[in-house]
Image (spheres, helix red, strand yellow):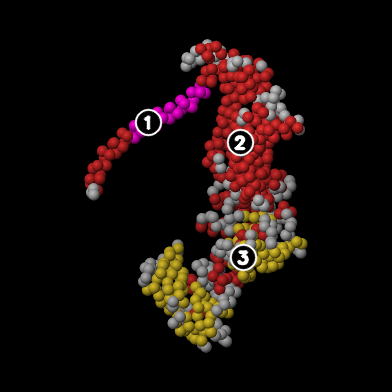
Amino acid sequence: MSIHLEQAGRDVDGIMHLADIDLTLEPGQLYVLLGRTHAGKTSLLRLLAGLDRPTSGRFTENGADLTRVSISKRSVAFVYQQFVNYPSFTVRGNIAAPLKRMGLPAGEIARRVDDVARRVHIEPFLDRLPGQLSGGQQQRLAIARALAKNASLLLFDEPLVNLDYKLREGLREELRNLFRQGNQTVVYATTEPEEALQMGGTTIVMHEGRVIQTGPAHQVYRNPASVTVAEVFSEPPMNVVPARIDGDRLHIGALDIPLPAHVPPGQGGDCRIGVQPHRIAHRQQAGSVRLDGPMDLAEVDGSSTFAHFTAQGHPWIARLDGVHVLAQGSAFAGYVDPRDFYVFTAAGALVVPPATQGAAHG
Amino acid sequence: MMSIAETTLVAAPLARKRARSGGRRRAITASLLGLFLIFQALPIYWIVRMSLMTPANVLSRPDFLPVDPSLDNYRTIFSDPSWYMSFVNQITYVCLNTVISLAVALPAAYAFSRYRFIGDKHVFFWLFTNRMAPPAVFLLPFFQLYSAVGLFDTPWAVALAHTLFVVPLAVWILEGFMSGIPREIDETALIDGYSLPRFFVTIFMPLIASGVGVTAFFCFMFSWIELLLARTLTSVDARPIVVTMTRTASSSGLDWGLLAAAGVLTILPGVAVIWFVRNYIAKGFALGRV
């Protein structure tokens, strides 16, 4: 069963929520919707679920029009960002609710409830009410209810975003395993590039209501089609600075370096250079270029430090391993290997990804 | 300018003074509250006192405690059908009104809370304009219309007339409660295969139970204490207790004790309802829109 969106769009009160969506969801595949908030991820999921209707374009399943098919006739499950359960039913009652509506025999329902509760580790709480569970358990319950149905299309709208870090890591791992076991089509929305890379599958990058790139996660990460994709698919956002190619020289501000070898010949004129924040190092390495400038701000995030500094007239962000004390206004020297440069045209289309592609990192 | 040391020195006696004046303030507050309580409770006590006395004693004896207390007045009420049937009539139309109002207001409030339709805001506001006219305005049309269809002097007449005033309030209160429930629950139920009616009864109603309790309370109380419509739309068969009381007062030369007993009995259902939904109301006032 493959689901197909063709030039689908949705306007609400004259405001564009989605436009020109061309998408094919193949059965049993995992799709990760990646985009910032308001990129249209939730709108697209609601469209796929049938909660909203496209205002333009076609929405089909195996060639049959889905636009006006009632949700109850389709096999869909949806997990929200908020913890949505039925507060007056017990955990068992919650998981059983969709199964009862499907008219399954009691024995089959009991078997499925126990099975799915075990898979998401909430079997000790089967007789409690959702209000008596912690946030993580409530979301597990919502996931359990969605999984129990064995729906052919499973939709997740940032299901882990309201959980604390530790829980999120654990649950993401479990979800990944669950998706691998099942033969359901899964669409999973997230704002986090790291999550998209960890989930794997096909990444669908969204921006301002449009799909801007689709492909296997690592491939999209390494070969972003445009500056926008690169910015969305990098946390913190990729450094993108204007530059100029002049023969075999590359000019970034006053910096004048030899054109990196991975840039194909025949380029010339204005372009843009992209550098992943984690590819800017604190120490000099062979062949690296030095970026000098005053520190603007340093943020320490667990095991790494985000150094915001200004060099060659542009703001940069470097993600340095370890905790560094960097005073505001002090001189900062960042080292970057020109082989790590993404080169984009002035308009933002990718010319060439970095030559050093071994160590992909979120 | 005072230095810090001086401030500290001055602060101690000030605190003592404040404590003294705090005690006095508490005493004043307590006595004011006490006065208010007496003001509120005295009439209730007085009607209970009168209901236990003979008419002659009610008029001649100013004692604070009841003189020769007896339950004769209550006995009269419970043995005379024109009295006790009045209670039955009133309870009938009040319950009818509450049930009809809730049955109408629940789907209406759900629609206002969940759907957008042309003129939804106007209709929501228009509901209220019904309450901006005094009930007396509707007396004549109600009287003529209900006479024409044979509803006059039935509990249905009063119940239906009251719904006109109660339903807008009920819709408004319920809409507030319903809008407090995330729409995602509705959508999840829809995806899980629930039909709207089944979802409404099995999942949604338990979530707004306190709102339904509060609304039922307001429907009940409005209908229970309303006199004008009840009096005009009934004559003999469906006459409610509030009307029987006023008619007795004008015709049979004022049997004070009997009237007082009927009054006490009229207060009781209200007390019972308040006791019944007390928990709901405490919750409802905090959560909803009352």
Instruction: Indicate yes or no whether the magenta region holds residue B36.
Output: yes
**Residue in view at x 46 percent, y 25 percent:** B38
Mark 2 surroundings within 10 Å by alpha-carbon count, few (fewer than 14), some (14 through 19), many (20 or more): few
- Is residue B117 shown in magenta? no
Cα separation, mark 3 vs mark 1, equals 66 Å
Q: Residue at x 62, y 51 (%)?
A: B184
Residue B255 visible somewhere in the drawing: yes
- Res A223 visible: no
Q: Could you tell me which secondary element the residue under label 1 belongs to?
A: helix
Say which residue appears at 58% left-offset and 33% top-offset: B277
Q: Which residue is mark 2?
A: B134
Q: Dot 3, crowdedness within 10 Å: few (<14), some or many (≥20)?
A: many
| Image quarter hosting the C terminus of chain B | top right
Q: Position of residue A315 (x, y in %)?
A: 45, 73
Q: Secondary structure at mark 2?
A: loop
Question: In the rendered structure, which amino acid carries the disc numbered 1?
Answer: Ile
Give yes or no for contact between labels 3 and 2 (Cβ–Cβ under 8 Å): no
Co-location on one chain, circles 2 and 1: yes
Mark 1 surroundings within 10 Å by alpha-carbon count, few (fewer than 14), some (14 through 19), many (20 or more):
few
Report, in whole angstroms, how far the alpha carbon at label 2 lies from the one at label 1: 40 Å
Q: Please state the chain letter of the residue tagged with numbered disc 2 in the rendered image.
A: B
Q: Which residue is mark 1?
A: B28
